[in-house]
Image: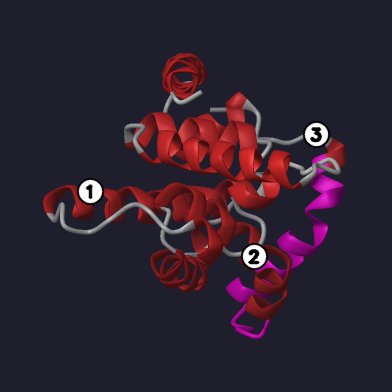
Amino acid sequence: MHTTEPDSIQQDGAEDRRDMAELVAGKPAALSGLMERHARPVFQFLYRMLGDEEDANDLAQETFIRVFRAAASYRPNQKFTTWLYAIAANLARNQLRWRARHPAVSLDTPLDEAPAGTLATLLPARGEDPGQASESVERVRAVQAAVAQLPEDLRAAIVLCEWEDMSVAEAAIVMEATPKAVESKLYRARKILRERLLTTR
């Protein structure tokens, strides 16, 4: 697969490539810069995938441990965030499969316990009065529940393309799938969400 990125992406990722080069050169302090820039977005991604703050926090830390250990496998001509999210997505997949074998573990986290930057903050209030705000809370709860019920691959497609603003091509790399397969998953996920959300109105 062709992984060379446009010049603008290469420029935007200059700090990441520099820090990765320093990691490979045996300078572990470079990991701090990567974490400062990306720890919060990675946590948010994992929270959206898993719906559990503790699991998301644990796997965000594990993601950066793996970045450190696998630094030599990173190719400077690929977008760092795509490589980073591929690591996080693999950890999320493993966790979801573990949950499938241990169904007593809940996917749900109460809305008032959700960390900043999750679904609760992605739907703007737009100056709603208290009645409208209550409706917004219910709408967010419905979206959370609907996304949590999606199969893992469909959930990943929605989270990466809708919330992480990745292109289909980038999401395909993260999901280890073809762009066509990701497009198909997005179509199916959106269809399921529309149907489920319409029934909750």
Q: Which residue is mark 3?
A: 6
| Residue 200 in magenta stretch | no
| Residue at x 33% of width, y 52% of height | 107
Considering depth in this image, is 79 or 142 the residue closer to the camera?
142
First in sequence, mark 3 or 1: give its number.
Answer: 3
* Circle 3 or circle 2, nearest the eye: 2
Q: Nearer the viewer, residue 197 or 155?
A: 197
- How many numbered discs? 3
Residue 178: x %, y % from top left = 46, 21
Query: Which residue is located at x 48 percent, y 70 percent?
Result: 57
Q: How far apart are the two marked residues, 2 and 1, measured between alpha carbons?
A: 24 Å
Q: Secondary structure at mark 2?
A: helix
Horizontally, residue 55 falls left or right of residue 30, namely: left
Q: Residues within 10 Å of mark 1 (few under 14, many from 20)?
A: few
Q: Earlier in the sequence, mark 2 or mark 1?
A: 2
Is residue 155 in sight in this rendering?
Answer: yes
> Would residue 162 appear left or right of 187 to someone viewing this image?
right
Residue 111 is situated, as x and y percent measured from the top left of the image, at 52, 56
Find residue 75 and report its horizontal and vertical position in percent.
Answer: 60, 51
Magenta segment's dominant SS is helix
Which residue in the rendered view is the most extreme toward the front?
A: 131
Q: Quadrant of residue 9?
A: top right
Magenta stretch bounds: 9-29
Q: Which residue is mark 1?
A: 97
